[in-house]
């Protein structure tokens, strides 16, 4: 009785100590969430300020004209463009909705946890903190399952889209090559997933209440590293690049770059014709990896003057360090998102809905994927808005560099027809998909630039 009484007497202090520890953990948890919330607000405000300052909201100061597709495109051309856009709407919107539905179901219901638990043979009740190597293998399995599942969901919509491109003559790929590109994309996304998950869970294990800070810094560094490495590591997986052969065009392009004060490592030709008939060029990388890439389809179908205008546009990106600025803004956006993700991944209500106890559980990756997908989708229209203004500034740069609005307009008309651009996009589709101004908008800029600089304004291409 004495021993029993002693134990009974010891009960209240032990319970009080346990309650004190529990209260301390709750208070610490709340303080960490408040700190993450403050960091998200501060970083978000900084992101808004940076975007507002670096975005060229008025790329052509003092001149703007409303686009009128009927001035440069016939009724048949407009109808063909509209038909193509309508044909792509099915796979585009269907793939978007199906992808969102799948990740939300996996992330916000116990189904995702059960699926991933079966894949990794989860034994959390008897193994609260597995060895690091075993935890890493489970994260690898989780990344493979989720990447494969999202790719499989997207595959039929991608095939549908590819069939539309073929029907309208924009794709030259065989199905084997197309599927090979999908597998390559799966591999690239899987590598990024694994790196991100391993880094995140190392932080969670080491700093369970403050991992948001390390994730913000790590996310920023990862975006920077991917941007720097992408041109030399990822792009060659999809295309072969060769230096443009010596000749008048290469000489003129390099001379134009030097005159513009833009250090460019090389002008490369991509063998895009093995996949598409579209015409394009772009600038990628920065520092020692910066190069201008021209599609071989562009060289085969456009005049040297039109190619020079396209390259002048890309020089505008390089001169303004658009790739570097985009990388820094993207890194800041990811850092902000990391703080928001901490709030999501430590929300008791969301964790219960997902069927997991904490972010340390590898099965919580389904919730993480859902949160990342929603954040990325919400940011998409804003990114597109900024991108369109940056592209418009590069157009203005090409006009200032070449002083040839007639060729600029002819080139934009040719690109729009060859690529079957949507010449009259609706506001929703325009916000959701358009990273560049529409062809008629770019043509209107060419005429506005000519009026501003007292250059003969090119007439309409289609007579009334």
Image (spheres, rainbow, N blue to C red):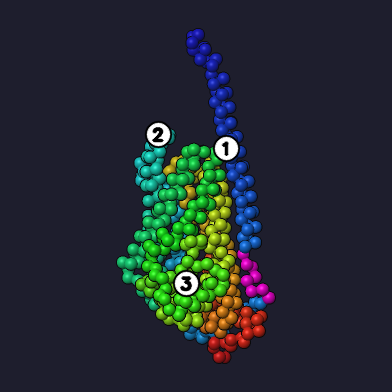
Foreground tag (2 vs 3): 3
Q: Residues within 10 Å of mark 1 (few under 14, many from 20)?
A: some
Is residue 256 rendered to the left or right of residue 453?
left
Q: Mark 1 points at which residue?
A: 29
As drawn, the residue found furthest toward the top would be 2
The part of the chain drawn in magenta is 55-62
Magenta highlight on residue 32: no
Residue 276 shows in this picture? no
As drawn, the residue found furthest toward the bottom would be 464
Could you tell me residue 97's position as x and y percent? 47, 61
Could you tell me residue 312's position as x and y percent? 53, 74
- Residue located 64% across and 54% down the image: 45
Q: Depth check: 430 or 225 in front?
A: 225
Q: Name the residue under label 3.
A: 281
Classify mark 3: helix, strand or loop: strand
- Residue located 61% across and 53% down the image: 44
The reply to whether discs 3 and 1 touch (Cβ–Cβ < 8 Å) is no
Is residue 384 rendered to the left or right of residue 266?
right
Is residue 245 rendered to the left or right of residue 412?
left
Q: Name the residue under label 2.
A: 127
- Residue located 63% across and 54% down the image: 46
Could you tell me residue 111's position as x and y percent? 42, 47
């Amino acid at each position: 009785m004495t021993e029993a009484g002693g134990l009974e007497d010891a009960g209240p202090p032990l319970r009080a100590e346990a309650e004190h520890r529990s209260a301390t953990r709750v208070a610490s948890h709340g303080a960490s969430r408040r700190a993450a919330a403050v960091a998200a607000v501060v970083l978000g405000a900084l992101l808004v300020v940076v975007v507002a300052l670096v975005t060229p909201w008025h790329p052509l100061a003092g001149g703007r004209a409303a686009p009128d597709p009927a001035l440069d495109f016939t009724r048949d051309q407009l109808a063909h463009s509209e038909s193509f856009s309508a044909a792509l709407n099915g796979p585009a919107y269907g793939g978007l909705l199906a992808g969102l539905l799948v990740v939300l179901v996996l992330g916000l219901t116990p189904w995702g946890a059960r699926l991933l638990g079966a894949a990794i043979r989860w034994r959390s009740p008897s193994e609260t903190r597995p060895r690091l190597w075993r935890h890493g293998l489970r994260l690898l399995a989780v990344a493979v399952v989720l990447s494969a599942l999202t790719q499989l969901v997207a595959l039929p919509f991608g095939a549908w889209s590819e069939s539309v491109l073929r029907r309208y003559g924009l794709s030259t790929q065989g199905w084997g090559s197309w599927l090979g590109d999908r597998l390559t994309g799966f591999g690239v996304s899987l590598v990024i997933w694994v790196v991100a998950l391993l880094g995140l869970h190392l932080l969670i294990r080491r700093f369970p209440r403050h991992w948001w800070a390390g994730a913000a810094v790590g996310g920023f560094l990862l975006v920077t590293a991917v941007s720097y490495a992408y041109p030399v590591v990822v792009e060659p997986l999809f295309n072969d690049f060769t230096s443009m052969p010596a000749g008048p065009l290469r000489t003129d392009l390099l001379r134009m770059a030097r005159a513009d004060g833009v250090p460019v490592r090389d002008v490369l030709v991509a063998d895009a014709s093995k996949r598409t008939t579209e015409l394009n060029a772009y600038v990628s990388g920065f520092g020692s990896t910066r190069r201008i890439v021209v599609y071989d389809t562009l060289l085969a179908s456009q005049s040297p003057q039109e190619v020079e205008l396209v390259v002048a546009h890309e020089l505008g990106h390089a001169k303004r360090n658009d790739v570097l600025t985009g990388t820094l803004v993207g890194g800041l956006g990811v850092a902000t998102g990391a703080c928001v993700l901490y709030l999501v991944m430590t929300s008791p209500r969301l964790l219960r809905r997902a069927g997991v106890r904490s972010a340390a559980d590898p099965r919580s990756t389904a919730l993480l994927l859902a949160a990342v997908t929603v954040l990325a989708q919400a940011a998409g229209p804003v990114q597109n808005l900024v991108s369109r203004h940056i592209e418009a500034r590069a157009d203005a740069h090409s006009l200032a560099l070449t002083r040839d609005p007639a060729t600029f307009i002819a080139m934009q008309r040719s690109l729009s027809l060859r690529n079957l651009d949507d010449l009259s996009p609706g506001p929703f589709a325009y916000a959701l998909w358009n990273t560049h101004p529409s062809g008629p908008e770019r043509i209107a800029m060419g005429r506005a630039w000519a009026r501003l600089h007292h250059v003969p304004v090119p007439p309409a291409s289609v007579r009334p």
